[in-house]
Image: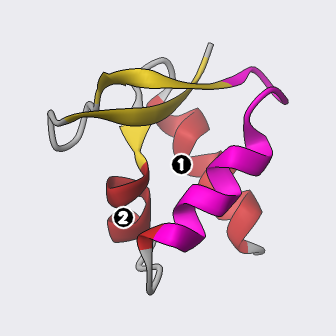
Amino acid sequence: MAVRDEVLALIERLSPSPICDDCVAEKLNLPTRQQASYRTRLLAGSKGIERRRDICSICYGEKLVSRQV
């Protein structure tokens, strides 16, 4: 499965709870947060994925998060 598909599947599983890029990277064992950030930015605006500043449902940090609405 491609990283993009793994990121999408994770966001969909957590829906409607938001997840930050740090937690996406950690949950999917990605080498860097930047990989997660790149993929979530690509997904934003498609398949009901939005990015906004909110509280991450995993780490509870106030960050830029992604969620499916």
Question: Total label count?
Answer: 2
Q: Residue furthest bottom?
A: 31
Q: Is residue 46 left or right of residue 65?
A: right
Quarter-wise, where is residue 14 in the image? Answer: top left
As rendered, which of 25 and 9 lies closer to the eye? 25
- List the residue tagged with mark 2: 27
* Secondary structure found at label 2: helix
Q: The residue under label 1 is which amino acid type?
A: Leu
Disc 1 and disc 2 in contact, CB within 8 angstroms: yes
Q: What is the x, y in percent for residue 8? A: 67, 48
For the point 54% across and 63% down, which residue is it?
36
- On screen, residue 51 versus residue 55, left or right, reads right
Residue 27 picture location, percent across and down: 36, 64
Marks 1 and 2, the one that precedes in the sequence: 1
Give yes or no for residue 63 being in the magenta stretch. Answer: no
**Quadrant of the image containing the N terminus:** bottom right
SS of the residue under disc 1: helix
Q: Main secondary structure of the magenta part?
A: helix
Residue 40 in the image, given as x and y percentages of width and height: 64, 48
**Which residue is at 62% across, 12% downward?**
69
Task: Decide: is 3 above or below 53.
Answer: below
The amino acid pointed to by label 2 is Lys
Q: Quadrant of residue 6?
A: bottom right
Q: State the CA–CA distance, disc 1 to disc 2.
A: 9 Å
Residue at 41% of width from left, 79% of height from top? 29
- Which residue bears the numbered disc 1? 10
In-front residue for pair 38/6:
38
Stretch in magenta: 34-49
- Identify the residue at the far top of this view: 69
Snapshot colouring: secondary structure
On residue 33, the disc is none
